[in-house]
Amino acid sequence: MLNVIGGRGLNSTRLYEELKRNVDPLSPENMLLIGVGPLTGTLLPASAYTTVSGKSPLTGILGDSAAGGFFGAELKLAGYDQIIITGRSEKPCYLLVSNDNVEIRDASHLWGKDIWETTAALRKELGDNAIQIAAIGPAGENLVKFATVACNNSRMFGRTGMGCLLGSKQLKAVVVRGKKRITVADTLRYADLCRKLETDILNHPEYEQRNALGSTLLMKALNGIGILPTRHFQEGVCPYVDEISGETLAERYKVKNKSCFNCNIHCSRYFITPQYEGEGPEYETLCSYTSRLGNSDLEFALKMTTFLNRMGMDSLSSGETIGWAMECAQRGLLTKEDLDGFDFSWGNTETIEKILRMMVYREGIGDAFAEGTRSLARRFGKGTDTYAFHVKGLDMICGDPRGIKAFGLCYAIASRGGDHLRAEPFFELTERYDEAEKRWGIREIADRLAVKGKAVLVEHTERQALISDCLTMCKNIGLSMDLMNVEFASQLLTAGTGLKFTPERVDDVLKRIIERDRLLNIDFGIEPSQDTLPERFRSEPLKEGASKGHIVPVEEMVKEYYKLKGWNERGIPQAKARKRP
């Protein structure tokens, strides 16, 4: 375990070393890991992220998801860097971690409650409103393959079905209370470094907009460059974007800003409508339940945000199943009779609301939808898999890769499937051509429509993303705002832990973790043919907007990426033989 830093890297390494490769994700033998980093809960801004990992019930490969809030800092205050859970309880239970005392308690009275109800009940039962709770809702209990885990009610471990993994173990919640001290090795040096980062955040040109709108600023931004998914990626420009934008959300419904532990960007928003209230939504949820499904009703999207948060179900995967059904219905591939009599026309909010509830409780056709888009498309056949927009079983995010080429490569090679957060090569959107040439010697890296150099950018930002996850720091700051790198991370780690971290050592650790993730997925059965994108993005040019005429030549970028990693033409790391479980 010497070549590890913490957080996601620690979890992935533990899985690589200890998990049986042929384990059924829903069997007691699957591991459930909850990890934080060496600097979590300190003065480091936004250092409260937590990663939950295991073999994904949705994809069958490496699964993990991260969330902010306050849970991670509390776990660190209790004295733990990682919790490892195996087996399966005979009855519903919750795990209580209170400093050195760890108990498994009965949760039969909580089974069936939603996440908000569960959180309130546990705080009342334990007589402590300061406890931090990561809980599942009915979707996790019913083993919806893309069920989520939530801390602070609305901070979601959203992707790859980690809520389903908790449900398979009959684990309703993990409850943490910590009252220990967190110390750092070189207090003054560490404080200086943290103050520098705080200043860099406040002086960043995107600070004000991120603070005001959070990630919902992307609705109009992506529409402006022609890549806002509209009617299931059939278009990249939404004619009613002003009705569903982050600006409209803030003006009409936002009542306050909220932040994670020790973060000076209060990017989360609390909203109130005449009927509903809650935290969020983030961009992916807002887009998933507006333009992606052809819906222009913002209040309805906020209603679905609250429902998904309470039930514990991923907005991206649930939204993609519905978008898939709507396009298949549009093209005559599926009829109402195929779909339990539902009218899956674009923007049909009545159908959306009903099918979501059926997914949560696995009722009727909702049972098939609860298995995820890949499984759903295979069940129906008849060419419907053409419109199932996933990579390796994980549904694609709300960013059309035809207009952001490096993101397209990232979706194709990401170790957990169709995901942007494994690299999030945001730099290609900046048009910082001189800086691109200075850093990498390739000006085109700063051009989102260019192909040249994008493998270089993804290989770089993949490590930049991982160091944020290992430090358990928000990637909006470390990666998208481009404020974290191996040089600064090594200084933080040295001052924080007292161990000697050089930039070279940190970079080597990151490369090893990425390689182990790849080897683990190869053991799970991943083939190089799966390092690709759905056919639409490879062969159908966008028809209008600022990305008009573009597709993603993903094959050539993947080959270049393999070469940069030192992998062979099949994407297999050329490493010395090592002990493999």
Image (cartoon, rainbow, N blue to C red):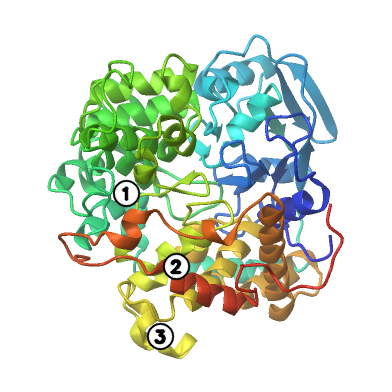
Q: Name the front one of labels 2 and 1.
A: 2
Which residue: 75% across, 38% down?
23
Answer whether residue 331 is visible to the viewer in this image. Answer: yes
**Camera-side residue of 412 and 292:** 412
What x and y, as percent, mark residue 292? 28, 42
The answer to which of marks 2 and 1 sits earlier in the sequence is 1
Which residue does the numbered mark 1 point to in the structure image?
A: 216
SS class, disc 1: helix
- Horizontal arrangement in the rendering, residue 168 relative to residue 310 (left or right): right
Which residue: 68% across, 41% down?
74
Which residue: 36% across, 83% down?
444
What amino acid type is highlighted by mark number 3? Glu
Q: Residue furthest front?
A: 382
What amino acid type is highlighted by mark number 1? Thr
What x and y, as percent, mark residue 287? 30, 43
- Horizontal arrangement in the rendering, residue 312 relative to residue 204 (left or right): right
Tell me the quadrant of the picture where the N terminus can be found: bottom right
Please report contact status of discs 2 and 3: CB closer than 8 Å, yes or no.
no
Q: Work out whether 361 lies above or below 577.
A: above
The answer to which of marks 2 and 3 sits earlier in the sequence is 2
Query: So how many labels did they put on this image?
Result: 3
**Label 3, label 1: how far apart the Cα atoms are:** 27 Å
Kindly identify which numbered label has been placed on residue 425.
2
Q: Quadrant of residue 285?
A: top left
Q: Residue furthest left?
A: 239
Which residue does the numbered mark 3 point to in the structure image?
A: 435
Q: Quadrant of residue 465?
A: bottom right
**Camera-side residue of 83 and 411:** 411
Q: Work out whether 318 lies above or below 49.
A: above
Residue neighbourhood size for the residue with mark 1, other residues' Cα within 10 Å, grouped as few (<14), some (14–19), many (≥20): many
